[in-house]
Image (cartoon, rainbow, N blue to C red):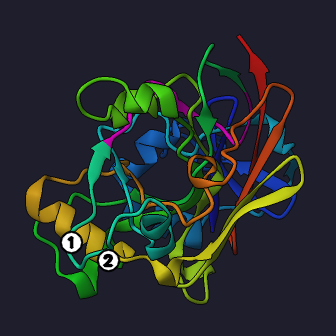
Amino acid sequence: MRIASRFGRALIVEGALCVDVENASNGAFSHRIDDLYQNWPGFLEWAHESAPAADQPFDASELDAPVQRPRQVFAIGLNYGAHATEAAIEPSDGMPPVFCKWQSSLAGPETTVVLPPGGNTDWEVELVVVVGRKARDIDTDKAWDVVAGLSVGQDITERIAQMAGPVPQFGLAKSFPGFSPIGPWLVTIDELSDPDDLELGCSLDGETMQLGRTKDLIYSVPRLLTNLSQKVELYPGDVVFTGTPGGVGLFRSPQRFIQPGEELVSWVEGIGSIRQSFVAR
């Protein structure tokens, strides 16, 4: 199943058509997609058993982020061996670095991003996990059970801001307006033949910059959720950016960063793609 938000209203998407959740459920479920995560099992039961067939056309440019007001947005650093290697950091079996992105940086799948002046803005395609149930101390073999679904994300990063100061500023440098696009929708796990092995990548103005597979995550999605839930409470609607593969601009020779007028397309196999264009401030 694919669940999206269009002009602030939750949808079930089937191909190029959609159905409005609130209208189709006669008000039993909210028009706000964030509200659906609070009763995700109940929503899924209704959607599978009672939702009518989609019959309304829509355009991807009309979609919002499939999560808009999460309580927590986690991001994982150095979670692919290739990315750790290009950063000249030895991969380890320990939990990768965890930082947080600000809710105000979230954006939908097709957006225009304003580049910070005097900065070096970089790309980081990521598989995004949305939590569907409250979770604490979950077992790894049951971790997929707490996932509402998966989406495509970009952890856009301003590298000068990241490296400023006595220690790196990960959260701030990755939370400028529009720096956390997600979309185009949420895909439930049953739609994917193997959610632990999905191709992901991104291109800048048609040139492939990153290409990897989620099977190469140092900490898989279940391991990440288990470890996070041992430290903090996970809530329905929480977002986890799971890490980026190798190929970011910072570690290229010569370095390359996003320029005004360029277009970044990011994708994950079985989910879809998102598209960001960039303008100068």
- In the shown orientation, is residue 90 left or right of residue 260? left
Q: Is residue 107 magenta?
A: yes
Q: Which residue is mark 2?
A: 222
Q: Which residue is mark 1?
A: 226
Q: Could you tell me the amino acid type at mark 1? A: Thr
Camera-nearest residue between 148 and 54: 148
For label 2, count other residues whose C-alpha is less than 10 Å away and answer few (under 14), some (14-19) or many (20+): many
Residue at figure coordinates x 38%, y 36% from the top left: 101
Residue 128 appears in the picture as rendered:
yes
Camera-nearest residue between 199 and 73: 199
Q: Toward which corner of the image does residue 3 lie, by quadrant?
A: bottom right
Whether tag 2 and tag 1 are in contact, CB under 8 A, the answer is yes
| Separation (CA) of disc 2 from disc 1 | 6 Å
Residue at figure coordinates x 49%, y 45% from the top left: 29
Q: Which residues are magenta?
A: 100-112
Q: Toward which corner of the image does residue 193 lie, by quadrant?
A: bottom right
